């Protein structure tokens, strides 16, 4: 066979060897045991799920930093204008702050689970609007609404608080009338806070 006739054969042989080498390299990149990409992805997802499960278990058995008993911040969280227990629960309602302004009156509360068992907390003024109010001189003033009807308040709250956990909530009401010196606050499920001074802001 002449050199000219042998050239195409050599080129074909070289191409076949290169193709085989590339295929072998790809096979080597696969995980051992012939596990494919799909199986590898499923295994990674399984590992992530197991990690999440361990974290959930750790939350149940070991308090997080948000557990006021573990961090010693329970007394700090309970500081405010006034606090009182919510009957039938392990929760304490804290009237944390009031902002008395010309345009509005903003009320801020905290709910702390001081019991050793989980406790549920739910606030939804959209479902029972009349139950949420500030009362001044026997006049009830309900949560403000925007032009589109949205309530000037934190979103409805429905949570199960683990022992030592805290949740906050706020709402904005119409401004107090001129000359008012005190008012009552009614935000279920907290008991009524009576005789709150306008100077407590």
Image: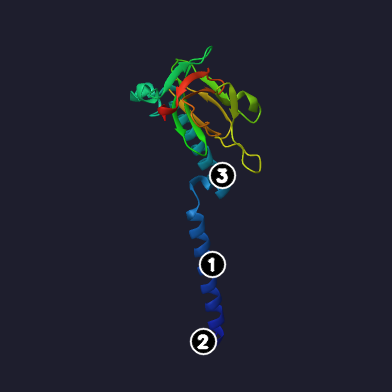
Residue 174 vs residue 69, the one in the foreground: 174
- For residue 76, above or below residue 11: above
Q: Earlier in the sequence, mark 3 or mark 1?
A: 1
Q: Find residue 39 and report its image quarter.
A: top right
**What secondary structure is found at the residue carrying circle 1?**
helix
Residue 57 shows in the view: no
Q: Position of residue 105 (x, y in %)?
A: 51, 33
Residues packed near mark 2 inside 10 Å, few (<14), some (14 to 19) or many (20 plus) = few
Residue, x 62% and y 38% (percent of image)? 145
Dividing the picture into quadrants, the one containing residue 127 is top right
For the residues marked 2 and 3, what is the alpha-carbon distance in whole angstroms? 50 Å
For discs 2 and 3, the disc positioned in front in the rendered view: 3
Q: Secondary structure at mark 2?
A: helix
- Pick the quarter of the image with the N terminus: bottom right
Disc 1 to disc 2, C-alpha distance: 24 Å
For the residues labelled 3 and 1, the Cα–Cα distance comes to 26 Å
Q: Residue furthest front?
A: 179
Could you say whether the residue bearing mark 3 is in a helix, strand or loop?
helix
Name the residue carrying label 3.
39
Q: Could you say where residue 119 lies in the image, as x and y percent from the top left?
A: 52, 19
Where residue 137 sits in the image (x, y, percent)?
Answer: 55, 22
Nearest the eye: 150 or 157: 150
- Check the image and report above or below for 44 versus 85: below
Q: Which residue is mark 2?
A: 3
Which disc, if any, is residue 19?
A: 1
Q: Is residue 166 left or right of residue 5?
A: left
Residue 104 image position (x, y, % from top left) = 52, 36
Q: Is there a contact, CB below 8 Å, between mark 3 and mark 1?
A: no
């Amino acid at each position: 066979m002449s050199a000219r006739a042998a050239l195409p054969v050599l080129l074909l042989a070289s191409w076949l060897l290169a193709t085989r080498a590339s295929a072998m390299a790809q096979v080597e990149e696969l995980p051992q045991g012939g596990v494919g990409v799909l199986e590898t992805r499923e295994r990674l997802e399984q590992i992530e799920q197991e990690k999440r499960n361990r974290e959930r278990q750790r939350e149940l058995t070991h308090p997080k930093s948000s557990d006021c008993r573990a961090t010693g911040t329970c007394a700090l969280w309970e500081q405010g204008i006034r606090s009182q227990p919510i009957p039938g629960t392990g929760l304490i309602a804290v009237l944390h702050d009031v902002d008395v302004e010309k345009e509005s009156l903003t009320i801020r509360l905290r709910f702390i689970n001081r019991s050793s068992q989980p406790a549920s907390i739910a606030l939804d003024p959209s479902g029972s609007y009349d139950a949420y109010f500030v009362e001044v001189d026997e006049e009830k003033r309900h949560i403000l609404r925007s032009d589109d009807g949205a309530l000037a308040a934190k979103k409805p709250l429905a949570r199960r608080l683990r022992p030592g956990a805290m949740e906050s909530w706020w709402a904005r009401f119409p401004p107090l009338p001129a000359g008012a010196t005190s008012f009552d606050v009614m935000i279920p499920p907290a008991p009524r806070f009576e005789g709150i001074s306008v100077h407590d802001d």
